[in-house]
Image (tube, rainbow, N blue to C red):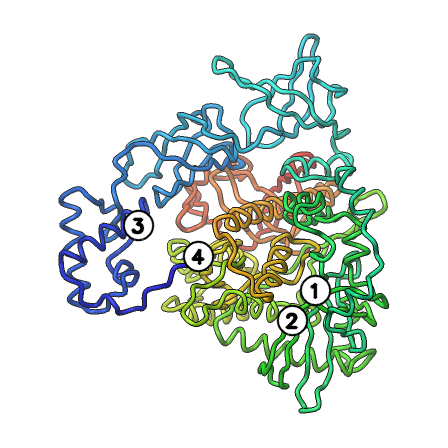
Amino acid sequence: MSKKKKKKGTQANISGSTLKEEIKDFFSKRKGQLFNYKQIAHKLGIKENSQKQAITNILKDFKETGEIEEAYPGRFRMKTGTNFAIGILEITSGGNGFVRSEEYDEPILILQKNLNKAVNGDRVKVYLYAKRPGRRLEGEVVEVLDRGRNLFVGIVEVYRNYAFLLPETKHIAYDIFIPLDKLNGATHGQKAVARITEWPGHVKNPFGEIVRVLGTPGEHETEMHAILAEFELPSDFPAEVEEEAEKISEIIPEEEIARRRDFRGVTTFTIDPADAKDFDDALSYRILANGHVEVGVHIADVTYYVKPGSLIDKEAYQRGTSVYLVDRVVPMLPEKLSNHVCSLIPNEDKLCFSAVFEMDKEGKIYQEWFGRTVIRSQRRFNYDEVQAIIEAGQGEMSEVLLPLHALAQKLRKDRFQKGSFAFERDEVKFVIDETGKPVSVFLKENKASNQLIEEFMLLANRRVAFFAGKKENGHPARTFVYRVHDKPNEEKLEAFTKFIKKFGYKINTSSGKKLAASMNNLMNEIKGKDEFNIIENLALRAMSKAVYSTQNIGHYGLAFDYYTHFTSPIRRYPDVMVHRLLSHYLNNGPSVNEKEYEEYCKHASEMERRAMEAERASIKYKQVEYMSDKIGQIYEGIISGITEWGMYVEIKETGCEGMVPIRDMKGDFYILDEENYRLIGRHTGKIYQLGDPVTIQVYKTNILKRQMDFKLIEE
């Protein structure tokens, strides 16, 4: 159950001894985290200046007695009393690693030579080296506590008496030894998936077996399946899951329709991408007798067909989400459900879970209703069709689409005024031929037709979360699945603020609302300029990642106190959980087990992360493939990343990114100025800084590694 928050100011007059205990308890619950006296005062609800001064004095006393340490000027944390830390290992593309531990505020650097058989995703115990002034916190792995993964993708090399799998990823620094009787049909040069079976302490390389042959490296199907395998994502459904899906009837019983609110006579439609196969949301619209309008947000009722504990449900939970690669969708649900039974296909009766709002033309809500419905969509639109109607001000169903567009824009304006961030990145899209080869790449803009759907989905998600999660009559809030987004990382935000000053820009960080407003103004100001993508990228990096949780901290980026995911149960398992919980609470069911649902949320967040990484990998692969026949061609680009081994450049025209290695930068030796995101020539003083425009020539491409090298063309 969620605990009640203490009201600000309720501790304004605590005694000195009590305040000491409060501060000691405060730090003990937040081991390794850094705080200054203002943050402590805020967390404890203290406003009086005299008590804030008392906090400063107590911190000095605790520092002198050794109970806490001042890690940075004015920032304190509790001493851990140990030279060890435990956390999850993340391997970078350079082969080194970082361990993020709750005990320390900054990640711990682990050089490749100190990984000691640990691989990406492992939970490890780390010995910490003595911290040197101005240097990163560094250590070495002394024990692997839990393996994060055992499956790896690579190229098979077969010799006379043995074989190896050479992993393609830097996530493991060792080749895997494969006995010849464990090749399982793999031949020399093929791409395959190996499982580590054992890793004896006295040998360098792990032992393994081939579990799946993917095919010939460089072939389209091989590489797409390799991306899925790299992130341990499925490509097919088990036969028993498909069989269970086939048994589901598409006929809706009349008694089920009778139990539901009937919207089949109300104007209803879907808007989706032109190539979409599943339609999980629809909108309905009608004018009421009192002059208000009724807007229905109708979501496919997956939970009617997918029962808890069924094979389909267990498989959907494990997958967590559909995966969207460049050329395909790997669905969360079998095709019979995702593309047929549950999909809101036009001119067919469909079961939905709906959020229905009575509103005026300014977007004010007078009544809302949540429950199960039956609908019949009259039209399936794609975004381009609706965009054309909005721009022309006329067209098919314009009497519905245009007022909904006007309402959506009012909701959107109100959201931004209340502090919502306006980050809307253009999507990288490809035109692909029948063999899977990309023939063109372009950036797809977020337009008014996208916003029409987006605003009503946001509204439904927000109101469902408020209904299920609000406290009533002094009772604690019920356990629910929220989509939460924490405040920005202070250090990253400070670094971002310094960086944009070099371009003559600034933002107001004094409050969340002012930060959002000034950030939105900044994005509008730089839209279309060379530095737009870089600044937007850095702004996004400063933000926290949105995750699923039962602990409602609100959604900072959207400026919502309550937010969930209710609108896409065909492709996201958290939405399935939300539908079940909403139904349970509508029927006055008791609050469910919080600990159990928090574990579900963690799994869903992890699977979402993997799916996003796989999507990015497929985009990168197709970008490199697209550029592979353009060796020697010259393009205008923007410096999009700075590292000690070179600089990344993004081509303006296509968004394709490649590396200019330092070793190939002629005329000087360049040194990394990490704090200012730039490379500086040691002798000439020439500077290459993040966001600078440059001219490059495509030098070489490596499709298998998804990498491109560029050469700098000097003016």
Q: Is residue 4 left or right of residue 220?
A: left
Name the spot of residue 702 as percent of width and height, x first: 67, 35
Q: Earlier in the sequence, mark 4 or mark 3?
A: 4
Instruction: Specify which label sits upstream in the sequence, 1 or 3.
Output: 3
Q: Position of residue 561 (x, y in %)?
A: 47, 67
CA gap, disc 4 to disc 2? 26 Å
Residue pointed to by mark 3: 34
Per the model, the C-alpha gap separating discs 1 and 3 is: 44 Å
Q: Secondary structure at mark 2?
A: strand
Task: Name the residue that disc number 4 marks.
Answer: 1
Q: Which quadrant of the figure has residue 210?
A: top right
**Residue type at the position of mark 1:** Ile
User: Are discs 2 and 1 less than 8 Å apart at CB?
Assistant: yes
Q: Which mark is residue 299?
A: 1
Q: In this orientation, does residue 40 appear?
A: yes
The answer to which of 154 and 234 lies nearer the viewer is: 234
